[in-house]
Image (cartoon, coloured by chain):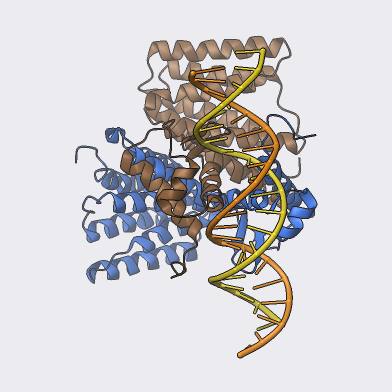
Chain colours: A brown, B blue, C yellow, D orange
Amino acid sequence: MPRMAGETGNSRIRRAVVQLILDRGLRPGAPLPTEAELMADLKVSRNSVREALKALQALDIVEIRHGYGTYVGHASLTPLVDGLTFRALARHDRDTGALAEILQIREVLEEGLIRRVATTLTEPDLDRLEKVVDRMDEAGRAGLPFDELDREFHELLYASLGNALVPQLLGAFWTVFRRVSGALGRPGQPAPDVTVRRHRDIVDALRARDIEGAQRAMAVHFHGIEARTAPDA
Amino acid sequence: MPRMAGETGNSRIRRAVVQLILDRGLRPGAPLPTEAELMADLKVSRNSVREALKALQALDIVEIRHGYGTYVGHASLTPLVDGLTFRALARHDRDTGALAEILQIREVLEEGLIRRVATTLTEPDLDRLEKVVDRMDEAGRAGLPFDELDREFHELLYASLGNALVPQLLGAFWTVFRRVSGALGRPGQPAPDVTVRRHRDIVDALRARDIEGAQRAMAVHFHGIEARTAPDA
DNA sequence: TTTCATTTGTACGTATGTATA
DNA sequence: TTATACATACGTACAAATGAA
């Protein structure tokens, strides 16, 4: 009896490991059986175990530490980042603009999301947002990049939603955008003071509880970015 | 000279393969070097090559066909599906509702997207959409499931955007939703005729070029689904 | 600091399953 | 059906990293 038909052993092992995590209710960071134990439990060779673990590692479902052990991963969206980055760089028909596609989705998402947080954001939340903008301003005047502050702003903006997936997804898009435009020779960013003002407009509108204005400000913010991704710029 | 510090050979091999695809401009489906060739080119063992390829396979960056060869993958969003499915099933704090998080994002996305297609959809597009609803109706009356038709409706709806990522992302969310609610014992779906009517309302509003109405109809559609994911349902 | 056991990383040889021509 | 090229699987050996005695 050689092996089950239609299924390579690798996917069987993968599912077994995943099922083990689920059954035992293991949390991210919890230790998994060693390769040797998995070999014995599943009655497969070490190579097969390792190939399965490598696949799960790529999905951030397991985390492997050399000389130490294997652990439950955080199932982050890094696989999505890797995939989208690859797609954007591999696009032959460059004019379709893989980056523009990502940006459009981000735009739709954030324009819709800002409406939902507009009513729930507290004054302290708005203070924190304003502080980030202030720091962006400082960095901009000093000629320093403030990519990370930009990211922080958008993450903070949607924290009150209580939806953990939102910042992760936006963060993934953001990372892809930065990586690709960097590796591809990024077109000049808009002037720092413009970006700062766009963000400040958003906070101002939110503070005034002007939902329409906030959404408009967000749209303006994105249109500023889109100009940089135009295929024939 | 043992090896580069801080980096395991596996990721080096992964990057080399990706770079090879990029440099040669290989398209999805194009053949990659055999394992033996990669061994020689990169001066590593077969195991190392295979582990790297398995990781890339999990990301759908390469596609491995048993007994035939290795090919450039389509970089689909299956890794995202796998990751989100795992997260949803592994959630210990079940009340946070990983499915509800996904659904909220879908809702925001589709409510924003429908506004953008409302003005660009042609009459033939609307006819096609209506035909899908008709088929849903038939299936519903016959007591058959029409999950796939539902998916087709939403894909068709946004086809005119020309954004290839949109249907893929929505499809990924949709697949996760179905898998998880299936594996978790799905709560009863709403009556088929209700679902059909909700979709017909969307088409009607679009045909009347009533943007607000279309967005409202989409919101109603999603609120019907959300009731099924309430943690304490 | 050194030593040691544990665990993952890499390598090689061999046999077997699988798809194509 | 056969031949060929390829991926799959296994077993063994050794290297490298980590943590603890």
Whether residue A184 is visible to the viewer of this picture, yes or no, is: yes
User: Viewer-proximal residue, B85 or A200?
Assistant: B85
User: Viewer-proximal residue, A151 or A16?
Assistant: A16
Q: Residue at x 40, y 49 (%)?
A: A41
- State left or right for residue B20 relative to residue A211: right
- State left or right for residue A165 relative to residue B97: right
Question: Where does the image place residue B138, in percent across and percent down from the top left?
Answer: 28, 71
Q: Residue at x 47, y 12 (%)?
A: A128
Q: Quadrant of residue C19?
A: bottom right
- State left or right for residue A178 relative to residue B89: right
Whether residue B25 is visible to the viewer of this picture, yes or no, is: no
Question: Where does the image place residue A139, in percent across and percent down from the top left?
Answer: 67, 12
Count all numbered tags in the image, as a single digit. Answer: 0
Q: Is residue A58 above or below residue A13?
A: above
Q: Is residue D13 above or below residue B35?
A: above
Quadrant occupied by the N terminus of chain A:
bottom left
Q: Residue at x 36, y 57 (%)?
A: B204
Question: Where does the image place residue B231, in percent across and percent down from the top left?
Answer: 24, 37
Q: Is residue C10 above or below residue B6?
A: below
User: Viewer-proximal residue, A137 or B2?
Assistant: B2
Quadrant occupied by the C terminus of chain A:
top right
Question: Where does the image place residue A186, in percent across and percent down from the top left?
Answer: 74, 34
Q: Residue at x 36, y 27 (%)?
A: A162
Q: Quadrant of residue A187?
A: top right
